């Protein structure tokens, strides 16, 4: 029996389509039917042309159109949709390359969007779980000192809250929190369990009525009422008391204050900026310790939250608070209200309870997510569109006959819908699989967004994809002039100078170049953060918190440690050198103005341990008795005191007044040395004026500088042994200064990681899209390419012709993208007092990369097409 | 043999198709058309204009099902009978035979 070849089948189909039918299931069956008949006639000895004519003549009498109508008449529309779904799946399988490119791009886009979306959602969900979230504000203090530097702190004074409650009607309730900046000792009364707690906070009784932390045991009205009460989280309760009911049990705070457990609360959710394991009653302060301090209006060491009666009166309440507090406060201090929901996304406040993320960083992240999603959508639209053009003739025929046009429309929509639906399903699966890895990758807890949000997103994306791709394509099809559709002249959609497709591709380039340059700038900055000269040496230095001020013991420990070969220096200080925040006080030099300076209390070995550069005067020295009341200041301080030549500051007298439990006292001493500025707080802030002095009672950290090239692990083991000999009951919680210092840039590193990984993905999507598009372009234009070749064009010339368009688009995108990126990353960089400069290379390099991707992908296909044998291609039509 | 009046046969075509499908694992449209013609000695000649609507109707009723497979550069739809179709075929056959009996009686008298 004679078999029809592909071209002959195509001829048969053309004949059948010309009868005006458009319902695919019928077309396929009739094609098969007529083919079979033709094949029979061929076997009888007819030529193909004759056979086709004969077969169609026979059939036409019986009318294809009537068959279709009879079938459609009896077909329920659900069956029709079902049919189209089947067909859609078939055509999806048929065009494997496009389908996989399409699906891959779409899936990647949606997956990335959902992952970054989860990151965004997590950070935005902070503190929104409180029922009263809209009405809770925190008081923040802003002080402009005489040197013109404004200090913003999350701290407020202890007496402020009660005063506000009493005098301002709009303040419905308030709660004060206090958290000591260092770990505190807590043990059970039998001494069996003893821990140093980082997360013990003291809170007013209103804590559980203002905030929505769920108490498991105890009543929210009274758990923290009165002194010496403590509420434990479930994990803390387990840690101290195991499975025994902790209610009514007692723990001892700092070996001194007995606290009775009055409640148990669920562990705090990770999207709360207040984190605690133990919550002591605020009334304990002032009754068991800190007797006078608690009544001082000017000591800022507390967090005050108020709950207002009605929402939205922030400004008025702020004004009343300011005028009320002005009467009590020394100096200029602005008190502002900060909505609780914006605490996590505000940066630039000192002494915050937990570190937040920069709003600009979040904006950058979500913009990138949106850009990647739109890249993949555009890709999708472009590809379905390009594919549809291959069927232009089919559509043209249908239009000529005036057939049921909505059938064509439904066909495109259904196909588009199926792909979008699968794309979303695969993405969900990918997200479920990737989510834990993503968490590890970012090294953070992530709250998964609720189901309804995901479903909503899914519906939105599927609709968007279906409508934008299906509708757009269907619509474009409807606009094809019929004659050119029939003549197969709808070839290169990119022919006009401006076309939507060109615009969409240009958008992809814009996104690609923009993303890459953002990655470069952010990576530069992160690199700068990790390698910037901070003015002190961090290498090989470890720090250990100390829990005693026993000078004799500490001195003995220092001596023992110094005798170890791997140890170069040992020093004590009041603060960590790894991103800590200093105490600040007002200092007066002789009769000059006072300036606010950071206070760092150290010992005689500190300067050497961290290799600080003494540029004038000398270091502290044990031989000089008077050094216990001497000061070393940094350059910034000297400058602010008005010394043009910083060295002249040495030798002057400095005095400051300090508050302690016994009231005000004044300390006066000589400036004996001047050190080069060093930045141990963070590169987010500029180096502040700073003074160092010797106050053994205020030391909280032991720093050990190990010699280079030592085996750190072995050294630390031996150091720990010596520590345990000296302080058997105190934990040895060491950390490397460098690691700890870097940890404060966690949110920047996270951002860099996200952007880096996902930009690579999106550039991959871009490349995929380009690949597929050029593939289509060249298949559609294969005839043109061949004619050009026949007429004498070289492969190189054809390549140039095709690439010209892309080069223009890349250049246009370069012009567009530069200002936007400069603006966005520039404002992100402004978060840092010290940052890198944006350089032209940051934009030129991405253009080169994208250019290379374009040249490689298009080049590959074009060269293949251009090397085709022209006779084969031209013969086809 | 001469071709019967198609109007007369319209009602029995579905049963004929079911009968054919009950004897074959699967058949496609053209094949069914040919088979009916051959088996009836050209007495029953179903046109594609009647055949395909009937096939679609039977499929929608769940009496037959279809599968599309590639055949020689084109898609071909193969039909096969379902369990429900077999039952329907039985009842319809009995019904037609009954009609035939009655018809014979009626026309003979």
Image (cartoon, coloured by chain):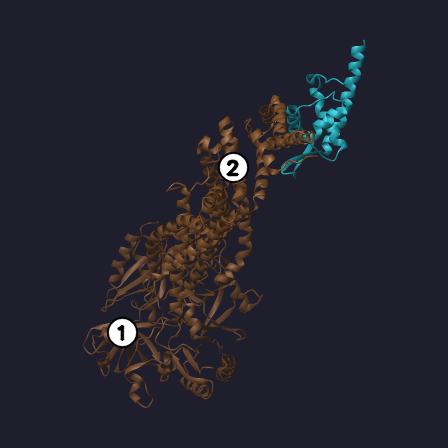
Chain colours: A brown, B cyan
> Which chain is mark 2 on?
A
CB under 8 Å between discs 1 and 2: no
* Residue placed under numbered mark 2 in the picture: A391
Percent position (x, y) of residue A450?
50, 50
Q: Residues within 10 Å of mark 1 (few under 14, many from 20)?
A: many
Q: Does label 1 or label 2 sit earlier along the sequence?
A: 2
Residue B43 is drawn in which quadrant?
top right
In the depicted structure, whether residue A783 falls above or below residue A770: above
Percent position (x, y) of residue A153?
33, 64
Residue A4 is drawn in which quadrant?
top right
Percent position (x, y) of residue A579?
38, 71
The local secondary structure at tag 1 comes to helix
In the depicted structure, whether residue A849 falls above or below residue A289: above
> Which chain is mark 1 on?
A
Percent position (x, y) of residue A463?
48, 41
Viewer-side residue, A503 vs A570: A503
Left of A467 or right of it: where is A496? left
Left of A42 or right of it: where is A382? left
Residue mark closest to the camera, 1 vs 2? 2
In the depicted structure, whether residue A206 falls above or below residue A795: below
In the depicted structure, whether residue A777 falls above or below residue A542: above
Query: Mark number for residue A652?
Result: none
The answer to whether residue A637 is seen in the rendering is: yes
Viewer-side residue, A690 vs A520: A520
């Amino acid at each position: 029996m004679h078999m029809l070849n592909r071209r002959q089948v195509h001829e048969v189909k053309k004949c059948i389509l010309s009868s005006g039918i458009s319902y695919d299931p019928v077309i396929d069956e009739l094609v098969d039917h007529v083919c079979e008949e033709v094949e029979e006639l061929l076997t009888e000895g007819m030529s193909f042309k004759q056979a086709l004519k004969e077969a169609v003549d026979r059939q036409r009498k019986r009318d294809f159109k009537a068959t279709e109508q009879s079938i459609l008449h009896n077909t329920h529309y659900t069956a029709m949709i079902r049919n189209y779904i089947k067909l859609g799946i078939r055509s999806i399988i048929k065009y494997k390359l496009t389908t996989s490119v399409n699906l891959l791009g779409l899936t990647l886009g949606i997956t990335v969007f959902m992952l970054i979306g989860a990151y965004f959602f997590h950070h935005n969900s902070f503190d929104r779980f409180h029922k009263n979230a809209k009405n809770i504000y925190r008081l923040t203090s802003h002080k402009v000192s005489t040197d013109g530097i404004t200090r913003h702190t999350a701290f407020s004074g202890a007496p402020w809250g009660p005063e506000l409650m009493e005098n301002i009607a709009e303040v419905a309730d308030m709660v004060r929190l206090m958290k000591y900046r260092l770990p505190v000792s807590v043990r059970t009364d039998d001494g069996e369990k003893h821990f140093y707690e980082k997360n013990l906070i003291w809170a007013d009784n209103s804590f559980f009525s203002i905030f929505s932390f769920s108490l498991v045991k105890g009543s929210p009205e009274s758990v923290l009422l009165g002194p010496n009460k403590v509420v434990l989280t479930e994990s803390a309760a387990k840690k101290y008391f195991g499975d025994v009911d902790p209610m009514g049990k007692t723990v001892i705070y700092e070996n001194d204050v007995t606290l009775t457990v009055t409640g148990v609360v669920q562990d705090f959710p990770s999207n709360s900026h207040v984190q605690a394991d133990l919550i002591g009653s605020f009334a304990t302060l002032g009754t068991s310790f800190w007797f006078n301090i608690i009544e001082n209006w000017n000591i800022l060491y507390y967090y005050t939250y108020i709950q207002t009666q009605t929402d939205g009166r922030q400004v008025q309440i702020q004004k009343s608070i300011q005028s009320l507090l002005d009467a009590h406060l020394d100096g200029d201090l602005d008190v502002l209200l900060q909505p609780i929901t914006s605490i996590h996304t505000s940066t630039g406040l000192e002494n915050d309870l937990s570190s937040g993320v920069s709003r600009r960083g979040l904006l950058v992240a979500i913009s990138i997510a949106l850009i990647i999603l739109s890249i993949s959508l555009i890709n999708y639209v472009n590809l379905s569109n390009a594919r549809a053009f291959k069927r232009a003739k089919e559509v043209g025929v249908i239009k000529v006959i005036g057939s049921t046009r909505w059938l064509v429309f439904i066909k495109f929509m259904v196909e588009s819908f199926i792909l979008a639906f699968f794309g979303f399903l695969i993405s969900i699966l990918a997200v479920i699989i990737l989510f834990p890895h993503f968490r590890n990758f970012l090294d953070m807890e992530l709250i998964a967004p609720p189901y309804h949000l995901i479903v909503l997103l899914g519906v939105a994306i599927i609709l968007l994809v279906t409508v934008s791709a299906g509708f757009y394509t269907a619509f474009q099809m409807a606009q094809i002039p019929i004659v050119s559709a029939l003549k197969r002249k709808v070839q290169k959609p990119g022919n006009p100078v401006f076309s939507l497709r060109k615009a969409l591709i240009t958008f992809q380039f814009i996104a690609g170049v923009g993303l890459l340059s953002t990655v470069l700038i952010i990576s530069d900055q992160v690199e700068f953060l990790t390698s910037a000269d901070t003015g002190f040496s961090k290498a090989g230095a470890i720090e250990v918190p100390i829990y005693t001020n026993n000078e004799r013991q500490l001195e003995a420990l220092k001596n023992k440690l110094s005798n170890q070969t791997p140890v170069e220096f040992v020093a004590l200080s009041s603060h960590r050198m790894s991103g800590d925040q200093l105490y600040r006080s007002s200092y007066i030099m002789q009769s000059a103005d006072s300036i606010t300076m950071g206070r760092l209390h150290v010992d005689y070995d500190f300067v050497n341990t961290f290799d600080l550069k003494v540029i004038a005067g000398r270091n502290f020295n044990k031989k000089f008795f008077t050094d216990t009341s001497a000061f070393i200041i940094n350059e910034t301080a000297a400058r602010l005191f008005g010394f043009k030549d910083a060295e002249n500051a040495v030798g002057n007298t400095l005095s400051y007044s300090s508050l302690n439990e016994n009231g005000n006292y004044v300390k006066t001493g000589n400036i004996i040395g001047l050190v080069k500025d060093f930045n141990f707080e963070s590169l987010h802030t500029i180096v502040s004026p700073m003074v160092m002095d010797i106050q053994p009672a205020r030391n909280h950290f032991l720093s050990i500088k190990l010699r280079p090239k030592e085996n750190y692990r072995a050294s630390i083991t031996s150091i720990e042994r010596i520590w345990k000999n000296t302080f058997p009951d105190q934990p040895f919680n060491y950390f490397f200064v460098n690691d700890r210092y870097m940890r404060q840039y966690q949110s920047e590193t996270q951002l860099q990681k996200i952007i880096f990984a996902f930009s690579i993905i999106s550039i991959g999507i871009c490349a995929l899209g380009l690949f597929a598009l050029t593939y289509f372009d060249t298949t559609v234009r294969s005839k043109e390419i061949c004619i050009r070749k026949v007429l004498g064009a070289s492969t190189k010339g054809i390549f140039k012709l095709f690439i010209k368009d892309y080069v223009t688009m890349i250049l246009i995108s370069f012009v567009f993208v530069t200002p936007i990126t400069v603006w966005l990353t520039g404002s992100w960089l402004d978060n840092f007092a010290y940052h890198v400069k944006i350089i032209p290379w940051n934009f030129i390099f991405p253009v080169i990369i994208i250019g290379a991707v374009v040249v490689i992908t298009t080049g590959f296909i074009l060269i293949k097409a251009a090397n085709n044998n022209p006779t084969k291609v031209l013969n086809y039509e | 043999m001469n071709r019967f009046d198609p109007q007369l046969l319209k009602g029995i075509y579905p049963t004929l198709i079911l009968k054919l499908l009950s004897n074959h694992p699967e058949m496609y449209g053209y094949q069914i058309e040919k088979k009916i013609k051959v088996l009836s000695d050209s007495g029953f000649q179903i046109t594609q204009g009647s055949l395909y609507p009937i096939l679609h109707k039977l499929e929608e009723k769940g009496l037959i099902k279809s599968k599309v497979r590639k055949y020689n550069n084109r898609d071909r739809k193969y039909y096969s009978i379902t369990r429900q179709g077999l039952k329907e075929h039985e009842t319809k056959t009995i019904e037609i035979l009954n009609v035939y009996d009655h018809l014979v009686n009626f026309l003979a008298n």
